[in-house]
Image (cartoon, grey):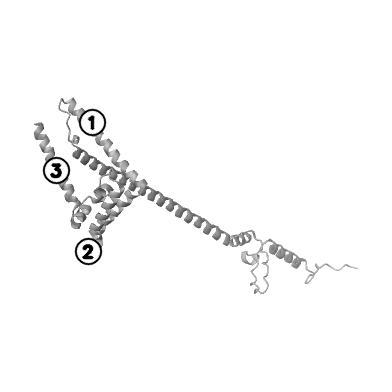
């Protein structure tokens, strides 16, 4: 039984190696297909997967793989599939940019280490469950090739989670900036409205003063003459507009009294002559 299991593993491991060797000599069409097939948006977030390099490989080895891959998928060499070639080339270039810079490469390696740690935790959970069931504590991930595969899958998932969080933060920042701008516009509109109201109020001040003076029966004071400006038309007296004020009434009363006692046309009362 153990011998059969060992033969199966040897066969599987041999097949994996053959696939890896075949992948190293992929044609441009096959590489473009690999980097643009459904799900590539999230799968290509893992730079090690894009360049098909092991995270433990040196930067020099990664650079060689990048050069080889970029030549295969370069748009100039794939004019018949230009759009997909551009997508594939952008993925390869972005992967190299992440691994070339010291800080971003370190961050990518940290993601891989987290994937390894989580894979080990999952393996312990599986063993614990088998132990509880009284079964042999042998799991798939004990196979180095399958362990590496499990780590690769989890690594891809972690990169995808990071990208989703980045997009959420970016959307939040964009939303907050939009709300802030909307508030600024609203405040500017409010200030403009208040300014316009104050201007209209100030412009109509003289009209309100004139109305009040007319209501009180007070004549409007003469306006100051501006040198060279035409003289304004004389405004009608307040008494003429409102049918006479107190001064006019008093004047009429005095005239009436004078007419009543005027000596003009006055005739003394007739009296009988005294008898002698």
Mark 1 or 3: in front is 3
Q: Quadrant of the N terminus?
A: top left
Question: Badge 1 is on which residue?
Answer: 124
Q: Quadrant of the C terminus?
A: bottom right
Indicate which disc, 1 or 3, sits on the residue closer to the N terminus: 3
Residue 247 occupies quadrant: bottom right
Mark 2–mark 1 Cα distance, whole angstroms, equals 50 Å
> Does 251 sit above or below residue 95?
below
Indicate which disc, 3 or 2, sits on the residue closer to the N terminus: 3
Question: Badge 2 is on which residue?
Answer: 79
Is label 1 in contact with label 3 (beta carbons under 8 Å)? no
Q: Is residue 120 left or right of residue 248?
A: left
Mark 3–mark 2 Cα distance, whole angstroms, equals 36 Å
Question: Badge 3 is on which residue?
Answer: 14
Mark 3 or 2: in front is 3
Q: Of 52 and 25, which appears nearest the observer?
A: 25
Name the spot of residue 216 as percent of width and height, x first: 64, 58
């Amino acid at each position: 039984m153990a011998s059969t299991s060992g033969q199966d593993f040897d066969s599987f491991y041999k097949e994996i190696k053959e696939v890896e060797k075949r992948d190293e000599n992929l044609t441009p069409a096959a590489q473009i297909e690999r980097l643009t097939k459904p799900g590539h948006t999230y799968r290509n977030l893992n730079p090690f997967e894009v360049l098909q390099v092991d995270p433990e490989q040196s930067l020099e080895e990664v650079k060689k793989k990048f050069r080889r891959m970029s030549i295969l998928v370069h748009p100039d060499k794939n004019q018949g599939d230009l759009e997909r070639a551009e997508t594939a080339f952008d993925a390869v270039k972005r992967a190299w940019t992440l691994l070339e810079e010291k800080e971003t490469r370190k961050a990518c390696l940290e993601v891989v280490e987290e994937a390894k740690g989580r894979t080990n935790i999952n393996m312990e959970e599986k063993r614990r469950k088998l132990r509880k069931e009284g079964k042999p504590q042998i799991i798939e991930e004990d196979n180095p090739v399958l362990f590496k595969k499990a780590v690769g899958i989890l690594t891809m998932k972690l990169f995808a989670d990071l990208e989703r969080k980045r997009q959420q933060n970016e959307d939040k920042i964009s939303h907050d900036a939009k709300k802030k701008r909307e508030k600024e516009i609203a405040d500017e509109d409010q200030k403009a409205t208040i300014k316009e109201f104050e201007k209209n109020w100030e412009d109509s001040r003289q009209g309100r003063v004139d109305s009040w003076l007319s209501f009180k029966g007070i004549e409007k004071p003469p306006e100051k003459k501006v040198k060279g400006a035409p003289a304004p038309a004389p405004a009608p007296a307040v008494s003429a507009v409102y049918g006479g004020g107190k001064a006019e009434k008093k004047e009429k009363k005095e005239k009436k009294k004078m007419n009543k006692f005027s000596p003009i046309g006055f005739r003394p009362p007739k009296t009988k002559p005294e008898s002698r």
